[in-house]
Amino acid sequence: MLRGNVRERVEELFLEIGERNDVEFDTLEIGEDHVHLFVSFPPRLSISEVVGKLKAISAKIVFEEFPEVEREMYGGEFWEDGYFVRTVGDEVTTKVIRRYIEYHDEEETRPNQLDLFDQ
């Protein structure tokens, strides 16, 4: 569902929402059915707050601007309820996260799992 104009609009919305809420996007990649983000934000915000704002605001605006999308969505929900979070630390470096996000959807150029962790 995240194709064409809808995909472009979701990217714009995420960046706008981030700017208004002190969320900095290092990397933002949008696939057809999921989004990968590498973000940083102040400690006063929780992960659930950031994800909640991104999902709620973007869904509301996408449905307003693209009413056909809401009709096509199963149960009228734009985003799934859950999300996956991984923090950057000793084992998982910024470089590893960026490489994963950049290559996750590129079948021809996607490195295999072991290559992601090569330094």
Image: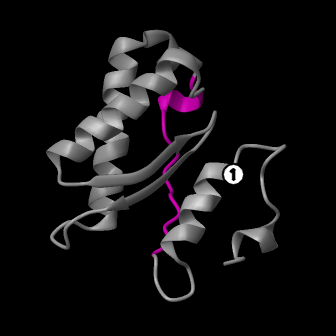
Tell me if residue 108 comes above or below residue 66 in the rendering.
below
Above or below: residue 52 compared with residue 71: below
* Colour theme: one colour
Prevailing SS of the magenta stretch: loop
In the rendered structure, which segment of residues is drawn in magenta?
73-87
Residue 65: image location, x then y, percent: 35, 13
Task: List the single residue furthest toward the bottom.
Answer: 90
33 or 103: nearer the viewer:
103
Instruction: Assess whether residue 81 is covered by the magenta stretch.
Output: yes
Report the residue at 48% width, 51% height from top. 81
Determine which residue is flagged by label 1. Answer: 104
Q: Residue furthest front?
A: 119
* Horizontal side, residue 55 vs residue 105: left or right: left
Quarter-wise, where is residue 75 in the image? Answer: top right
Q: Position of residue 114 (x, y in %)?
A: 80, 74
Amino acid tagged 1 = His
In percent of width and height, residue 109 lies at 79, 47
- Which quadrant holds the N terminus? top right
Secondary structure at numbered mark 1: loop
Q: Which one is in front, 79 or 27?
A: 27
User: On screen, 115 above or below 100?
Assistant: below
**Residue at horizontal 49 percent and vertical 67 percent from the top:** 85
Looking at the image, which residue is at 82% across and 44% down? 107
Q: Magenta stretch containing residue 111, yes or no?
A: no
User: Circle 1: is it few (<14), some (14-19), or many (20+) Cα within 10 Å?
Assistant: some
Locate residue 5 relative to residue 45 in the image: left or right. right
* Residue at image location 56% in from the left, 25% down from the top: 73
